[in-house]
Amino acid sequence: MVYLIEHWDDVGQLMLQHLWLTVSALGIATVIAFPVGLLLARVAWLRGPILGLLGVLYTIPSLSLLVLLIPILRLGYWPAVGTLVIYAQLILVRNIVIGLSGVDAAIVEAARGMGMSDWQRLLQVELPLAMPLLLAGLRIATLSTIAIATVAAFVNAGGLGTLLFDGVRSSNREKIVAGAIAVSALAIAANALLRRAEVWVSRGLQ
Amino acid sequence: MFPLLVVMVLLAACGGGSATAPTAAPAAEATAAPTGSGKPITIGSKNFTEAILVAELYAQVLEANGFSVDRKFNLGATSIAQAALQSGDIDVTHDIEEALRLADRIIVMNQGRIVQVDAPLALLTRPANRFVEQLTGADDLLRALSLIPVGAALSATPPAPGSAPTTDLTPLGPQDSLRSALIRLLASPEASLPVVDEGREVGRLTLETLRAMLPRRGGETWST
């Protein structure tokens, strides 16, 4: 705890790096996952193979994934973000598919009966109804991304992993504790924020 | 492959100036453009204290010599350092074989001093001193030849004049080593062997071409 108090500026900077890694990775991951999720929600037979593939990617250990990405994305920020994006896909895509296909068929049918186009139905009926599940997916993905982002330290991309692994390397318990507390604080804050958004959205639906 | 890559062989004062640093040293590798072009040399290290210290020593020596240095220390695993070296993301290695294979220009350091900055071929054929000669293995003639590709020998010497049309000899490729070329030449009845790159004959290798590539010390051809 002493370390955390004495070096709050260092920890804060690493925390910001960690946050930036998480946010940018989630941004990119969402942009990719959204169309994929929409496609899978419409084309049922693709679900098995694609979710299976994402599941396989999810099981690759982070260190191996980093090594695989370095020849393409070089050293530093990008392989770290690439790894996080790949891991987030399974959770995000799965939740989009479940959310969209979980919308009551009768409501979709009613929307069609009212003469809504495909896009109108998606934007005005299906997405709002699926929103709590989509946000739940985003929340889980955020938490796992915050946790996994510690490996960014392995490729010189910064983040709180630097603190944790420096602590492990130099047997400095203070650093490990400080890193762990900082990561947990990020995760708890992100969880609370997104949980609130979920509650707010589901209240809006009633 | 990496037109601007400069792999540096940084040898700290370790023991009797041996060719490779102890295994505990970092997998440090560095990329950089030739001196003065301003592109920094990236020094990597693995994530343990000794590795980071040694990498920092390298960085400071290079900076003292006017190079700009990019520090990428604290890498999480050998496989990461290795992948980054292969992709040209870090430029320092202790492994001369690796340096000769990957680099366009090599900075050789001994005892904290830069002793030679040259292309791999030049390091092999014109080592600046005894240390470089031993480091690159240029003092072992066959070893030196095994590290020089046929293509480099062809481009370094004028084409052999008046070569006879090829019989059905298996051609040499530009990536073959001069060592295997020498063996082929010795075994062949022909005075020269064709070098074929992607189906096109790019030149002929003779014993003369090969001899011109032999390492020299002060203008003298090696005497072994």
Image: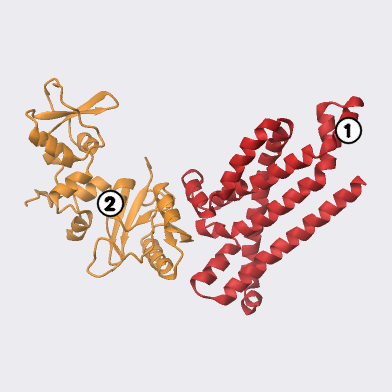
Identity of the residue drawn at 61% across and 36% down? A49
Q: Residues within 10 Å of mark 2 (few under 14, many from 20)?
A: some
Q: Is residue B38 visible?
A: no
Residue located 19% across and 45% down the image: B146
Q: Looking at numbered disc 1 in the image, what kind of residue is underneath it?
A: Ala
A13 and B37: which one is in front? A13
Kind of residue sitting beneath label 2? Glu
Colour displayed for chain B in the image of the structure: orange
Residue B105's place in the image compared with B130, above or below, is above
Q: Colour of chain A?
A: red
Q: Residue A158: horizontal and vertical position, in percent? A: 56, 60
Task: Pinpoint residue B197: horizontal percent, then vertical percent.
Answer: 27, 28
* Residue highlighted by disc 1: A106
* Quarter of the view holding residue A146: bottom right
Q: Nearer the viewer, mark 2 or mark 1?
A: 1
Disc 2 with disc 1 on a shared chain: no
Left or right, A51 with respect to A106, comes to: left
Q: Which mark is residue B97?
A: 2
Callout 1: 10 Å neighbours few (<14), some, many (20+)?
A: few
Q: Chain of mark 1?
A: A
Q: Is residue A63 visible?
A: yes
Q: Say which residue appears at 51% left-offset and 58% top-offset.
A: A154
Q: Secondary structure at mark 1?
A: helix
